[in-house]
Amino acid sequence: MKSETLNFETANGSTTAYAAMPDDRNETTKAVILIQEWWGLNEHIKDIARRYANEGFIAIAPDLYRGKLATNPDEAAELMADLKIEDGIDTIKNTVRKVRESYGNADVGISGYCMGGTYSLRAACEVEGIKAAAPFYGDIPSEEILQKLKVPVLFISGTKDAWINPAKVAELKSAAKKYNLPVESISYEADHAFFNDTRPDVYDENAAKDAWVRVIRLFRENL
């Protein structure tokens, strides 16, 4: 496995992305864009990118905060609030473009956690070139946006999540049924951010391991 930093332009200025890939990336045609939690592009997200590389994918984590990192929930909430949804989606669009420029005609999937789950689900609806998505406990967009969804989505949540609670997940399930959307929803008896193994207060090893297997299967089957 190896890694590198990508530099590219967006409508709101330049940014970077952390990229991890197998040693022989020329034989890799599957790429996953990984969207950060509200903390920013920290070492935890980079570690997940490396896990994808070890599974044979090119993983690219764009920096939606352009170098800023939060060290506590108040800072994280402020950074997330300052990020306009249009800016985040544009950064993802340009990440897809940069992936194609840097790694050839790779098939692109997207995943993300918390805030990143929100952006990865919305990007699956609105960003051309994404072929599958695995959002973790992200917010649910409006039905108007969800109706645009054409690619397979595996939505992952926790029943103990006070933010993306079962009622919100039910909204997604209802829209998926109403509009015949390609959405599969998996819920674990776990809290918000249960995949984050740097947070022992919420990390659930069994749920995280099972979710990882399902996500890897999704991308291997659809990219």
Image (cartoon, helix red, strand yellow):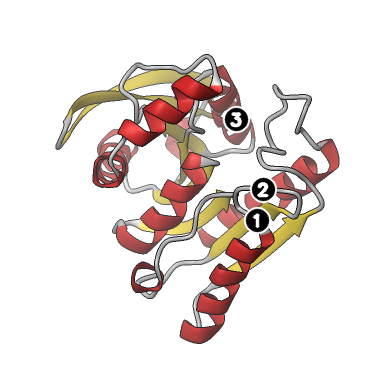
- Viewer-nearest residue: 212 or 169: 169
Q: Residues within 10 Å of mark 3 (few under 14, many from 20)?
A: some
Please identify the quadrant where the N terminus is shown.
top right
Secondary structure of residue under mark 1: loop
With respect to residue 128, does 70 lie above or below? above
Percent across and percent down for residue 163 are 60, 48
Percent across and percent down for residue 52 are 59, 35
Secondary structure of residue under mark 2: loop
- Viewer-nearest residue: 68 or 81: 81
- 59 displayed left or right of 95: right
**Amino acid beneath label 2:** Ala
At x 70% / y 22%, what residue is drawn? 198
The image's mark for residue 48 is 3
Question: How much space separates mark 3 and mark 2, taking CA atoms?
Answer: 24 Å
- Viewer-nearest residue: 165 or 108: 165
The image's mark for residue 162 is 2
At x 39% / y 67%, what residue is drawn? 142
Residue wearing tag 1: 165
What is the tally of numbered marks visible in this picture? 3
Question: How much space separates mark 1 and mark 2, taking CA atoms?
Answer: 5 Å
Say which of marks 3 and 2 sits in front.
2
Secondary structure of residue under mark 3: helix
Question: How much space separates mark 1 and mark 3, taking CA atoms?
Answer: 24 Å
**Amino acid beneath label 3:** Ile
- Mark found first going from the N terminus, 1 or 3: 3
The image's mark for residue 25 is none
Mark 1 vs 2: CB contact within 8 A: yes
- 87 displayed left or right of 199: left
- The quadrant in which residue 217 appears is bottom right
Percent across and percent down for residue 196 are 68, 31
At x 60% / y 58%, what residue is drawn? 155
Q: How crowded is mark 2: few (under 14 residues within 10 Å), some or many (20 or more)?
A: few
